[in-house]
Amino acid sequence: MVFDVLTLFPRMFDGPFSESLLGRSQKAKRLDIRIHNLRDWADDVRHQKVDDRPYGGGAGMVIQAEPVYRALKDLGALKKGKGRPWVVYLSPQGRTLTQGLCEKISQRKHVILICGHYEGIDERVMSWVDEEVSIGDYVLTGGEIPAMVLVDAVSRLVPGVVGDPESVINESFSSGLLDHAHYTRPAVWKGLKVPAVLLSGDHKGIAGWRKAEALKRTKLKRPDILKKR
Ligand code: 4GX
């Protein structure tokens, strides 16, 4: 899967995308995450200015339409037809990112993410945006962290990114329930015992315990999920 990220702060992505699963999967060519500096498409190549004051006045700056348009054009988003990438703008006005939306996005081969800053981008480029996505109802300083969240959550659904496909299938949300509790060695720690069934070797018993635990936890911690199910 290919991600193109358009940002004014490309270095913010250095850490999160080079470590752990995402780093490994890029080396293995399962993922191709390309970070682009929006300033490379600035009108004024020398000053590389890509923002300006809002018409009508008020605080803050607005990212100009032209650099975003040029970047989208170069990345293939303006052509029509099948190979066209899916263009996402991260913004608090978007549809909330859920596991379901991540699954939907993971079906795409090529996704372009636009990270807004300041007061956002000129509304006139929105006609090339396929989908606005929000990571939650709070205001951040820019769209970079939301883009990282989306790339991370979507990437782990790409076949091969998470080594054991079981851990993607059995986890929270996919089943509509929270995950059951987990324990590892030692079997007794500070006098606290691991539930006996997990040491029993009885696979059916273990599966039953886990299912019941997951239900109990969901009822207790996230009753809203149960209602939706
Ligand atoms: N989930 N931000 C976008 C710029 C902006 C401001 C106003 C449109 C309108 C966010 C979020 C988020 C901060 C990214 C403001 N764009 N993005 N940016 N929550 O808070 O996705």
Image: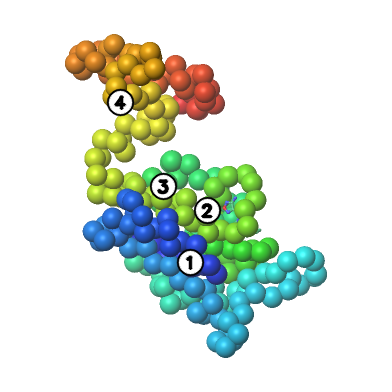
Nearer the N terminus, badge 3 or badge 1? 1
Q: Can residue 189 be seen in this view?
A: yes
Q: Distance between the residues labelled 3 and 4?
A: 26 Å
Give the residue at mark 4.
184
Q: Which amino acid does label 3 sit on?
A: Ala
Name the front one of labels 1 and 2. 1
Q: Is residue 178 above or below residue 158?
A: above
Disc 2 to disc 3: CB gap under 8 Å: no
Q: Is residue 130 visible?
A: no
Q: Position of residue 11 (x, y in %)?
A: 48, 66
Q: Does the residue labelled 3 lie within 8 Å of ligand 1?
A: no
**What residue lies at 21% left-to-right and 13% top-to-bottom?**
200
Which element is circle 4 on? loop
Instruction: State the image quarter where residue 202 is shown.
Output: top left
Q: What residue type is labelled 4?
A: Thr
Nearer the N terminus, badge 2 or badge 4? 2
Q: How far apart are marks 1 and 2 (CA)?
A: 15 Å
Give the residue at mark 2.
146
Q: Distance between the residues labelled 4 and 1?
A: 37 Å
Q: Where is residue 87 in the image (x, y as percent from the top left)?
A: 47, 62
Give the residue at mark 3.
153
Q: Position of residue 183 (x, y in %)?
A: 33, 24
